[in-house]
Amino acid sequence: MINSTVDDNGRAQIPDQQQHHCHCCQFHSQNQHKPVPVPVPKCLPKRIILVRHGESEGNKDDAMYTVTPDYRIPLTPKGIDQAKDAGSRIFDIVSDNGSEDNWKVYFYVSPYVRARSTLREIGRAFSRRRVLGVREECRIREQDFGNFQVADRMKVIKETRERFGRFFYRFPEGESAADVYDRVSSFLESLWRDIDMNRLHHDPNDDLNLVIISHGLASRVFLMKWFKWTVEQFEYLSNLGNCGFRVIQLGLGGEYSLAVHHTEEEMLEWGLSPEMISDQKWRAHASRCSWKDKCSWYLDAFFDHLANSDEDDYDEVKSDFSD
């Protein structure tokens, strides 16, 4: 295994003198004295796949929430079929439709019954030798809406949330999306420690695929944290469908991106803006050391105008004062 560390987004940080020659890490330097970014060391996961649970009885009938605790609500028969189908599709992705042999999966799952049942059905697509392990992770559970949910009261509450803002509105006796963001961020930090310390017991000769079976909001805030999206950008994101999934995959340069696996049309449908999609396309081919040179659109989201140089800025300030 390469002696490496990872940054907050799982990108490789490897000393220049170490050159790794596996199929996903080949690189060449025309100047041995210049730093060379190493794209994809084998110790990092090739993919992180975020999966929403299958259709639940609560998705089918809101009245379930008034008599059954949210965490106990089961899948419907349709949801079970959706999970089986998702398992087959995920298997095709990680195995490249059966053409690749050196790969493994590791599962993280929400403790809610509908998520665990989804995992059980997805798992039918994999043999035991393919599964490194599974871990129940409470921090990726559903947003807490506040114990039993009375239908008429919840209707008024959700209307208030739309006026207040979906990210910051906190449900009475429950959580806001911002609260979920905080615990998902904590989970993400633990995830990278697991990888960096090889707690998953991953053989570096195999592609590692992390499959996280969770809920719609938890998956969206995971993406928000991962790609450093703003609250405003989050507000436009659409929810995943039941057993829908998003594939975050390593590009050739060592950046993770949605655009490696997904199309522009899909990302538009999910609510990503043209600027966000452009960033995903760039990440699919970018090297980790060049990000700061390519994020002018991100700066523009915070500043009305930035001068191109200090001289331009000085001249503009003098002009403002002279007026």
Image: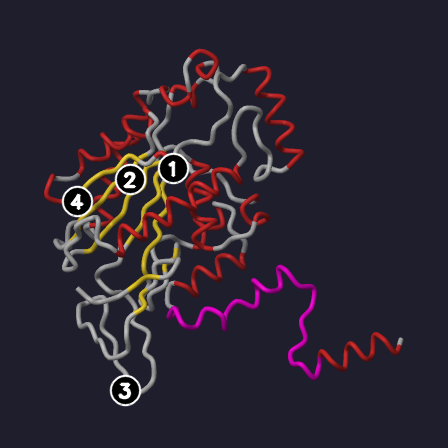
Q: Where is residue 29 drawn, in percent x and y? A: 28, 83
The magenta segment: 286-312
Q: Earlier in the sequence, mark 2 or mark 1?
A: 2
Q: Where is residue 109 drawn, in percent x and y? A: 30, 35
Q: Earlier in the sequence, mark 3 or mark 1?
A: 3
> Count of labels shown?
4
Q: Measured along the vertical axis of the image, is residue 32 above or below residue 74?
A: below
Please identify the quarter of the rendering in which residue 312 is found: bottom right
45 magenta-colored: no
Few, some or many residues within 10 Å of mark 3 (<14, 14–19, 20+): few
Quadrant containing the N terminus is bottom left
Please identify the quarter of the rendering in which residue 44 is found: bottom left
Q: Which mark is residue 108?
A: 2
| Residue type, mark 2 in image | Tyr
Few, some or many residues within 10 Å of mark 1 (<14, 14–19, 20+): many
308 magenta-colored: yes
Few, some or many residues within 10 Å of mark 4 (<14, 14–19, 20+): some
